[in-house]
Image (tube, rainbow, N blue to C red):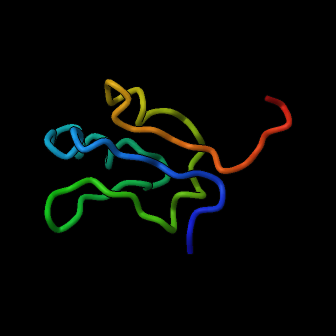
């Protein structure tokens, strides 16, 4: 099932940094990330809508390596 609320874009540079990949997997409170069989960081699609927008993944990365796109419109913005 595709995500309804957000999508997460992972820059290719993240895949070159295994420490960052492991850190992102371990720090996400709702298990959005996992390491694939070929040691690449990927999202767990069925968990995307559990994202709390805590920004821990964005703060752990640099140079906009992780981007979260909201797929909904917020009336408060």
Quarter location, residue 69:
top right
Q: Residue at x 56, y 75 (%)?
A: 1
**x, y percent for residue 49:** 60, 58
Q: Is 26 in front, or is 36? A: 36
Q: Residue at x 38, y 29 (%)?
A: 64
**x, y percent for residue 36:** 23, 64
Which residue of the protein is positioned furthest toward the right in this rendering?
75
Quarter location, residue 20:
top left
Which residue of the protein is positioned furthest toward the bottom in this rendering?
1
Q: Residue at x 32, y 57 (%)?
A: 42
Quarter the C terminus occupies = top right
The answer to whether residue 62 is above or below residue 20 is: above
Q: Is 16 in front, or is 29? A: 16
Q: Is 47 in front, or is 12? A: 12
**x, y percent for residue 68:** 51, 41
The answer to whether residue 65 is above or below residue 47 is: above
52 horizontally vs 64: left or right: right
Q: Residue at x 52, y 52 (%)?
A: 7
């Amino acid at each position: 099932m595709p995500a309804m609320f957000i999508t997460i874009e992972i820059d290719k540079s993240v895949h070159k940094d295994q420490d960052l990949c492991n850190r992102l997997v371990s720090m996400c409170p709702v298990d959005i990330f996992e390491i694939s069989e070929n040691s690449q960081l990927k999202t767990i699609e069925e968990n995307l809508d559990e994202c709390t927008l805590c920004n821990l993944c964005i703060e752990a990365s640099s140079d906009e390596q992780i981007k979260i796109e909201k797929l909904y419109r917020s009336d408060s913005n």
